[in-house]
Image (spheres, coloured by chain):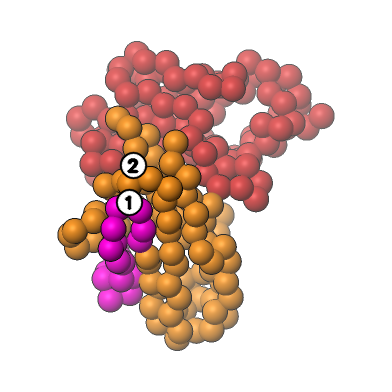
Chain colours: A red, B orange
Amino acid sequence: GDSVTQMEGPVTLSEEAFLTINCTYTATGYPSLFWYVQYPGEGLQLLLKATKADDKGSNKGFEATYRKETTSFHLEKGSVQVSDSAVYFCALDTGRRALTFGSGTRLQVQP
Amino acid sequence: SAVISQKPSRDICQRGTSLTIQCQVDSQVTMMFWYRQQPGQSLTLIATANQGSEATYESGFVIDKFPISRPNLTFSTLTVSNMSPEDSSIYLCSVAQGASEQYFGPGTRLTVT
């Protein structure tokens, strides 16, 4: 079946550090890929998406590139802020519009 | 993007009772979903609720335990029946919009004692 594997957290970084959160997937066909973010005490928000191979999704300084050859969709940000502290979920949709989520990665950014 | 509200936002319930969670969307949508997020865990799809048809449940979830209604294109309910402490979770509804986006409600935090 479909699955998403994320690097385990928590990830602790200093402000302005470079961020990478790894995400790999297993799916039939060509899924759409997503990153969602859950800030403390808030609901789940769509951060960015990519719907086909080599697409790059970007939002709020975050980027992720859909790599079909490595079945990956790693999340990156060049300079994190304290306000980026949250839980990040990688997810996929194989076309039936329901999402399969990874386990989530907690990011803690220290000033 | 769709604006989604859920009621109640949280509840504490006794074992053996049932709770119905409401999900309201500010626009008409075809596909709605219900997810569960157990403490410290990721989200797991419970069922897909399309208006005019029976809900489709994922493996491990059954209609007797999680009955779902979808009376129109802007509203759905999920009932958690005969609750046990293992049902303590955040329950979220979501809607599919556009080519691929999916938007989530704020969630209902359920504690079963």
Quickly name the residue at label 1.
B32
Which mark is first along the chain, 2 or 1? 1
Is residue B32 found inside the magenta-colored segment of the image? no
Q: Residues within 10 Å of mark 1 (few under 14, many from 20)?
A: many
Q: Secondary structure at mark 2?
A: strand
Which residue corresponds to the image point at 68% horizontal and 23% vertical from the top-left? Answer: A80
Image coordinates for residue A33, horizontal then vertical, percent: 37, 30
First to last magenta residue range:
B59-76
Q: Secondary structure at mark 1?
A: strand
Residue A84 visible to an observer of this rendering? yes
Which residue corresponds to the image point at 78% horizontal and 32% vertical from the top-left? Answer: A110
Q: Which quadrant of the structure image shows residue B64?
A: bottom left
Q: Amino acid at mark 2?
A: Ala
Image coordinates for residue A73, horizontal then vertical, percent: 42, 25
Q: Nearer the viewer, residue A76 or A9?
A: A76
Residue B57 visible to an observer of this rendering? no
Q: Nearer the viewer, residue B55 or A83?
A: B55
Is residue B63 found inside the magenta-colored segment of the image? yes
> Disc 2 is attached to a residue of which chain?
B
Which residue corresponds to the image point at 38% horizontal and 45% vertical from the top-left? Answer: B27
* Quarter of the figure with the C terminus of chain A: top right
Q: Are marks 1 and 2 in contact (CB under 8 Å)?
A: yes
Q: Which quadrant of the structure image shows residue B78?
A: bottom left
Quickly name the residue at label 2.
B96
Q: Is residue B15 above or below residue B93?
A: below
Alpha-carbon span between mark 1 and mark 2: 7 Å
